[in-house]
Image: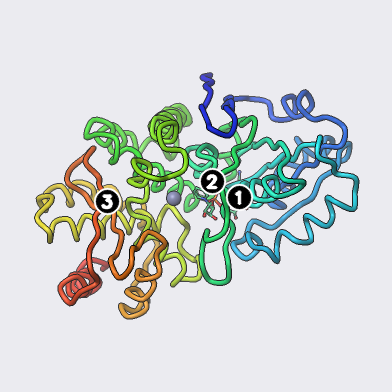
Amino acid sequence: MYNFTVKSIIHDYEVNFIEDTKAVLEQEIKEGDFIIIDNKIKELYKDELGEILAANKFIGIDATEPQKSYQGAEPVLKHLIENGFRKNHRLIAIGGGITQDITAFMSSILYRGVDWMFFPTSLLAQGDSCIGSKTSINFGDFKNLVGGFYPPNKIFINPKFLDTLSEQEMKSGLGEMLHYFIVSSEEDFRRFKNDYPQALTDKKVLAGIIARSLEIKKSYIERDEFDQNIRQVFNYGHTFGHAIESLTNYRIPHGIAVSYGMDMSNFVSVKLGYIPDSLRRDVRELVEKIWSGTQITDISLDKFTSALSKDKKNIGKQLGLILNKGYGKIFKDLRPMDDEFIGWLKEYFANELN
Ligand SMILES: NC(=O)c1ccc[n+]([C@@H]2O[C@H](COP(=O)([O-])OP(=O)(O)OC[C@H]3O[C@@H](n4cnc5c(N)ncnc54)[C@H](O)[C@@H]3O)[C@@H](O)[C@H]2O)c1
Ligand SMILES: [Zn+2]
């Protein structure tokens, strides 16, 4: 399959598509390295990975948002330090975005930085989070508030892991990848919309979406790795999405929350005259398929506006919103949380979520 290198200010790293995780692990792992594995993957893949885990040092973790915190990382760091993990050893993460964020964060601070590798197992991690260097953990109720930039040295993507992913997690991954296609161009959006129905069942179609998603993301992160300008458009759908995630206690998976968030961003963009309603409807036909089976009608508008006002992209009292002026024309806008804006949200919550 296809492999590529991502250029990084910290260090370049390789992305390899693989078919045999066990064989690659056997080849890569050296004495002293520690595997950090999602407990769910450890159970689901015991036939394939049991032997290699038995022969090497590993730590199983639960992939939950509370685990992605100082409190969650502390016992893992303690175990590593007390069990012979040294600066020349590597951490090898096997799991989704949560396992990635925990491992990346620990790798960046332990002994002022150790090498790490990543075997992403969720669609969201394979098609998005595995590249881009971000290493966030949560702080109290605030998501991804503490962290830095620290890419793995190598990434190995085996799409076979996706066979055991729930339909909801598959849709979450597709919802998350969709925002890259809208940011990229109308052509990319059309192809995604056309491929979406097959992507849930056809591995080849899905692999094409993953590869294109990474390709679009790569082209931005190589120019703005530290999220200081052009990369910020990838927060499209995320200001609203993060508020949905935290107000539903993470019941709504990230990429599904982002799908609602993109529709809300489009709704506001229509109100501001940036796009015609027909464009919002065009995207909405797709995002409705992604979020079908979930509902967020229990979110109160007051709590929603309060969550928006805490977003890390805000400047002073201005909301840092990523809005839509058309496919390929997503941009950052600063807007006050005034009565007009709150009125639009009220209208959205009353009419658009049924
Ligand atoms: N660092 C970044 O750039 C970045 C980018 C996007 C998202 N994230 C973070 O990633 C997290 C979301 O990622 P995620 O959706 O991969 O989360 P996750 O790691 O929690 O995985 C989602 C669920 O799927 C399970 N799972 C993973 N792989 C599986 C498989 N092959 N078969 C069956 N079940 C499997 C997990 O156990 C978990 O229950 C969030 O915390 C988000 O903030 C980070
Ligand atoms: Zn995201």
Tell me which residue sits at (58%, 66%) in the image: 139
Q: Residue under label 2, please give it.
A: 134
Tell me which residue sits at (78%, 55%) in the image: 77
Front residue of this view, candidates 161 and 293: 161
Would the CB of label 2 be found within 8 Å of ligand 1? yes
Q: Residue under label 3, please give it.
A: 332
Question: What's the residue type where badge 3 is placed?
Answer: Lys
* Separation of residues labelled 2 and 1 (CA atoms): 8 Å
Which quarter of the rendered picture does the C terminus lie within? Answer: bottom left
- Measured as percent of width and height from the top left, residue 31 is found at 87, 32
Vertical side of 289 occupied by 133: above or below: above
Front residue of this view, candidates 144 and 121: 144
* Separation of residues labelled 3 and 2 (CA atoms): 20 Å
Front residue of this view, candidates 297 and 138: 138
- Measured as percent of width and height from the top left, residue 40 is found at 68, 51
- Measured as percent of width and height from the top left, residue 107 is found at 70, 45
Q: Residue under label 1, please give it.
A: 101
Residue count near mark 2 (Cα–Cα under 10 Å), binned few <14, some 14–19, many ≥20? many
Kind of element beneath mark 1: helix
**Tally of numbered tags:** 3
Would the CB of label 1 be found within 8 Å of ligand 1? yes
Query: Comparing marks 1 and 3, which lies closer to the viewer?
Result: 3
* Separation of residues labelled 1 and 3 (CA atoms): 26 Å
